[in-house]
Image (cartoon, helix red, strand yellow):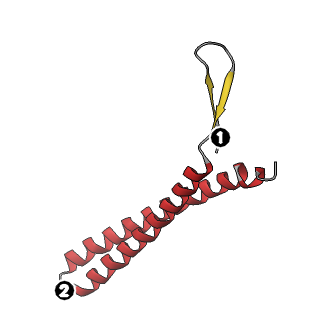
Amino acid sequence: MEPHDFSRANDDSERRLAPASDAVTDLIVALSICATSLNQLADEVVRCAACTNDPDQREDLWAAARGQRIRVLEVQGMLAALTKAFTESYVGHEGS
């Protein structure tokens, strides 16, 4: 997590602000739950596609499932980046 620089209104000194570690861990947990939920949704859509006899509907459901799988990968990427940044910013500085 890269802290942001903000100039104070009354002088030119700068303050370094970073999100609290609890907020970041809450976001990591939320992204993890989101990835799991999206994956479960995609699984369910695939099950629905297997149950239909209409080829057009089956293709539409498979396309929707693929879209969900892509979203899962996007969320997992965000989760990996956030976890790495958290580890570098907070875990590495615990003993300081």
Numbered disc total: 2
User: Considering only vertical position in the picture, is 50 above or below 73?
Assistant: below
Secondary structure under the numbered disc 2 in the rendered image? loop
Q: Position of residue 77 (x, y in %)?
A: 55, 59
Q: Is residue 91 above or below residue 66?
A: above
Residue 82 at x, y percent in the picture: 60, 54
Residue highlighted by disc 1: 2
Disc assigned to residue 33: none
The amino acid type of the residue labelled 2 equals Asn
Q: Given the image, on which type of amino acid does mark 1 rest?
A: Glu
Image quadrant in which you'd find residue 81: bottom right
Query: In this picture, is 89 found above or below 8?
Result: below
User: Residue 53 bears which disc, if any?
Assistant: 2
The secondary element bearing badge 1 is classed as loop
For the point 39% across and 75% down, the residue is 40
- Residue visible at 27% across and 73% down? 61
Q: Which quadrant of the rendered structure holds the N terminus?
A: top right
- Residue farthest toward the top in the current orientation of the protein: 10
In this rendering, the answer to whether 39 lies above or below 96 is below
Residue at 41% in and 70% down: 37
Could you say which is closer to the camera, residue 90 or residue 76?
90
Seen as rendered, the residue at the extreme right is 96
